Amino acid sequence: MSAQEDAARLLVRTLEAEGVEYVFGIPGEENIHFVDALNDSSIRYVLVRHEQGAAFMAEIYGRLTGKAGVASATLGPGAINLQLGVADATTNSTPVVAISAQVGLDRIYKESHQIVDLVSLFRPITKWSELAPRAEALPEMVRKAFKTAQTERPGAVYLAIPEDVESARVPAGLAPLPVNVVRPQEPSPSQVARAADVLALARRPIVLVGHGATRQGASAALVYLSERLGLPVATTFNGKGVFPDDHRNALGAVGFMRHDYVNFGFDEADVLITVGYELQEFDPVKINPSGDKKIIHIHPSPAEVDDHYAVEVGIQGDIPRSLYALADSVHRRFDVNGTGRRIRELMRDELAEGAAEEGFPLSPRRIVADVRAAMGREDIVLADTGAVKMWMARMYPTYEPNTLLVSNGLSSMGFAVPGAIAAKLAHPDRKVLAATGDGAFLMNSQELETAVRENVPITVLIWDDSAYGLIGWKMELDLGRSSHIAFGNPDFVKYAESFGAHGYRVESAAELLPTLRKALADDGVSVVTVPVDYSHNLRLTDKLGELTDPF
């Protein structure tokens, strides 16, 4: 090796040391050395069509693997385009490392072409945002970036690399730092004992599970706690799947805009055991409106402050170990499964009714039922933000962690198509479906070309109503009318085919399930468009709004 190497190659070696497999991005003039250096590495560079897509890909990769996904962009507009996905990752507690170019240090201090203070722009939406002041700092700064992104509570970080720093020469002996993995923290025995004392006096405790439990692999421990103590378990939308919906103690997911069946289980509860729950997932006022329920908070991080989330006991530490310790410390069982059984029956009946609906355009319930029938237990669905998310997150049964992915922190539209690409790269052995409204689809539909070019077989299911359906739903609920939500669409079949993907149009209710199965079996990228009848939206919210006692 020569006495020196350029900083771009040092940067790539630091990424390899962190175990990075993919970098998602678009090159620019100011980071060409970095992109070129990736050619001689083990890292696959995935060229995208918009930096927003790169950030969403990095986010979903980070969510599914627990390792920070990496998004790359040039300076100025390229970096700014990363911001939506970066903010989405932080609010969804997902590890992402965003790296962009920046103007050289020789002119960053003065007015000049393409200068924007990117570090300041990224600071409010990341856990850490900094500029590399010299090439020799890269090993330390990259190690800090990954450690910060991946440590509970995970989130996005940002690193700006000036153009002259990237191309600088550094001593060849400069090496990446060792990767130190933080060991899970043992739960405090005294806090576990305090929580056991609370449960000893409880009448109707209930468990609420958030995405933090998924990140820590807490499924088995949750089942153990639930079965040993006889506790009903509900999840947030982001936590779906960490406790299987076909378990006898499962209540389903909370997060819908109306007081749903599962909410009645919380109405009866006097103690809430929250596991890996974070407040941005679901407003605690909707499950603790009077602020009088005792809360046991189990999470690696302390609870946030909220007047409807006053914690009685906080068990801060490794979630699975905390759950096992608590389960073994409580010497009683609760007989509260009557409510849970009825909640499961009501949701099961709704799904069965939906599967039998033959109307065209299709009812949302029919689409949800057919998607469930087409997908395996471990297959992955990404439900984009909009009315699609409401129907899928509420009704779609999940049995394994991270098999229904939604954005519930920032609730960004347009993440599902690029996210599906990352999901397939993370789990090439599973089927991956992006369920998206037509509005969200066209926000990042250009990434179909990325999927085709990179040979990443995904299926996209477009719920087509030629409108922003969720906004119309909200307008009708609050204002009694809707406006400025309708738009025109291209021929989605021809649009898909123009990218080299397969295109399918569903023209009857009976066609959806066989079309989905065919599309999912395709050796390539497939797009299925299905007309949806969103008149069912108001019927559902009206029904739930009139519901006073489903039992």
Image: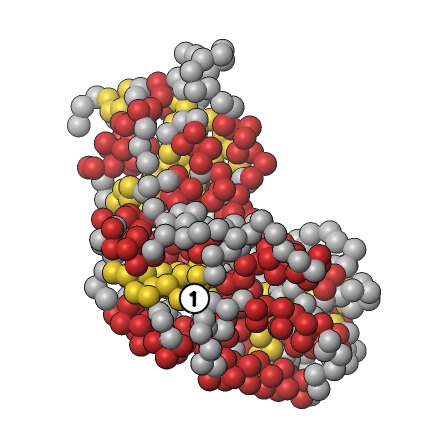
Q: Is residue 321 left or right of residue 308?
A: left
| Residue at which label 1 appears | 531
Q: Indicate the position of residue 433 as horizontal and vertical percent values.
A: 37, 64
Where, quadrant-wise, is the N terminus in this rendering? top left
Q: Nearer the viewer, residue 169 or 244?
A: 244
Q: Image quadrant of residue 340? A: bottom right
Q: Image quadrant of residue 303? A: bottom right
In this rendering, the answer to whether 18 lies above or below 166 is below
Q: Is residue 227 visible?
A: no
Tell me how many marks there are.
1
In this rendering, the answer to whether 134 lies above or below 49 is above
Q: Residue at x 49, y 27 (%)?
A: 118
Q: Residue at x 28, y 47 (%)?
A: 450
**Other-residue count near label 1 (Cα within 10 Å), few / some / many at <14 / 14–19 / ≥20:** many
Q: Nearer the viewer, residue 149 or 510?
A: 510
Inspect the image, locate mark 1, and give the three-letter code of the amino acid beneath it. Answer: Pro
Q: Nearer the viewer, residue 328 or 347?
A: 347
Q: Indicate the position of residue 115 as horizontal and vertical percent values.
A: 46, 19
Q: Residue at x 62, y 73 (%)?
A: 540
Where, quadrant-wise, is the C terminus in this rendering? bottom right
Q: Is residue 44 visible?
A: yes
